[in-house]
Image: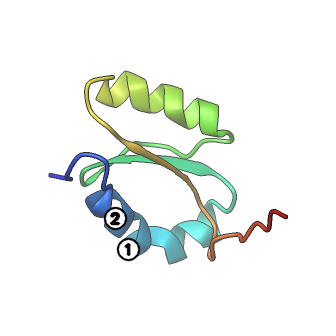
Amino acid sequence: MATTGSFSVELRVFEQHREDWSHSYPGKYVAIQDGIILDGFFDSYADAFRAGLEKFGVRREFLVKQVWSTEPVYFVS
């Protein structure tokens, strides 16, 4: 079980699948809680978040992450 706020399990699951997902679902969003991957990929963060709330509920954290082969870098000045 993930420690509150750490998302270590969820991020590990994401990294295990990143390569496959980036080929099949680039730019889509996925929701993960502990080792459970929500069925389906979503076009927007909001859609993935809503589906995560329906599946996982509001009492426990879950990760919503966009699928890319590499993380985008943003510069703010």
Q: How many marks?
A: 2
* Disc 1 target residue: 16
User: From the viewer's perspective, is residue 29 above or below residue 59?
Assistant: below
Residue 26 image offset from top left, x and y in percent? 67, 62
Instruction: Spot the residue most to the right.
Output: 77
Tell me the SS state at disc 1: helix
Instruction: Spot the residue most to the left.
Output: 1
Number of other residues with Cα within 10 Å of mark 2, as a class: few under 14, some 14 to 19, many 20 or more: some
Residue 73 image offset from top left, x and y in percent? 72, 71
Residue 2 image offset from top left, x and y in percent? 20, 53
Display coloring = rainbow
x 60%, y 69%: residue: 22
Instruction: Spot the residue most to the front.
Output: 77
Marks 1 and 2: in contact by CB < 8 Å? yes
Specify the quadrant that holds the C terminus: bottom right
x 70%, y 69%: residue: 72
Q: Nearer the viewer, residue 46 or 7?
A: 7
Task: Identify which amino acid the numbered label 1 is placed on.
Answer: Gln
x 63%, y 76%: residue: 70
Q: Is residue 13 left or right of residue 45?
A: left
Task: Identify which amino acid the numbered label 2 is placed on.
Answer: Val
Residue 55 image offset from top left, x and y in percent? 34, 28
Rounded to the nearest angstrom, the CA distance separating label 2 from label 1 is 5 Å
Tell me the SS state at disc 2: helix
Q: Nearer the viewer, residue 37 or 75?
A: 75
* Disc 2 target residue: 13
Residue 62, by quadrant, is top left
Number of other residues with Cα within 10 Å of mark 1, as a class: few under 14, some 14 to 19, many 20 or more: few
